[in-house]
Amino acid sequence: MALARLPQIEQLHLADVTLPESHPRAGEPCPVFAFLIPHPDGYVLVDTGVGEGHKGIETLYSPQVHPLAAELEARDVSSADIIAIINTHLHFDHCGENRQFPSTPIYVQRAEHEAAQAPLYSIREWIDFEGADYQLLNGESEVAPGVATIPTPGHTPGHQSVVIDSEEGRVIIAGQAVYSADEWTGAATPTNEWDDAQYKASLESLRRLRPDRVYFSHDPLVWECS
Ligand SMILES: [Zn+2]
């Protein structure tokens, strides 16, 4: 099922982190984006940014957080308006404020939820909280009419991207399946992912969907089909 109109998706700039010593791009700043999809039934929120108050994350990444609650309030959106959350994956900078949404369904791939059980994969208390309502997916799934998730493993074992179909066009929220607009166009080459071969295959599968617009979790640039 497709939406009648192409929704005006909001990029929420939730944090800037500094990449740590262990990272191939150590020392570089990295913005963190989440996405708000207006829907006839409410809003679908894709990712929830970096949580606050974790010493290890603060030491390693020096996050400058723009609180999700304030970003939503600035858009006149309350947490009760969020009908569903999609986590592209469960790294700390994508699920940090899931805790604000007890009893809201959170859609994540089963493979990702399993991977996140490993020590140091993420921040346990940002994922597991009282009232958490994880809906574990085994592949493609329509989360709301016109809003679907598709597995795009490579950055992590259970990464997923979001495809929004309307009669006016198709939008993809790639998440971190594609790091940047330059990777999308082929101007930059991806390296050092959990599984480079799967990452490249996922990138190709997203390109085959021939979207009109693509958003990225860590690049402010939005790619548009010209
Ligand atoms: Zn990640």
Image (tube, helix red, strand yellow):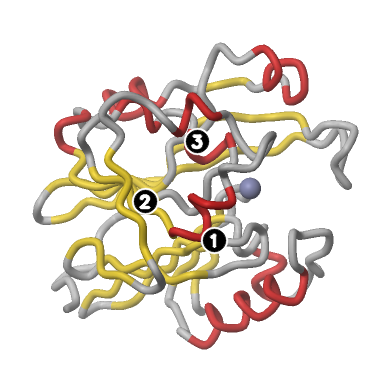
Name which of mark 1 and mark 3 comes first in the sequence: 3
**Amino acid type at mark 3:** His
Provide the secondary structure element on which disc 2 rests. strand
- Point out the frontmost of discs 3 and 2: 2
Name which of mark 2 and mark 1 comes first in the sequence: 2
* Separation of residues labelled 2 and 1 (CA atoms): 13 Å
Which corner quadrant of the image does residue 118 belong to? Answer: top right
Name which of mark 3 and mark 2 comes first in the sequence: 3
**Amino acid type at mark 2:** Ile
**In the rendered image, the vertical position of residue 130 relative to residue 88, given as above or below:** above
**In the rendered image, the vertical position of residue 164 relative to residue 123, given as above or below:** below
State if disc 2 and disc 3 touch (CB < 8 Å). Answer: no
Which residue corresponds to mark 2?
86
* Separation of residues labelled 3 and 2 (CA atoms): 17 Å
Residue at horizontal 37%, vertical 74%? Answer: 140
In the rendered structure, find residue 158 and report the number of the disc placed on it: 1
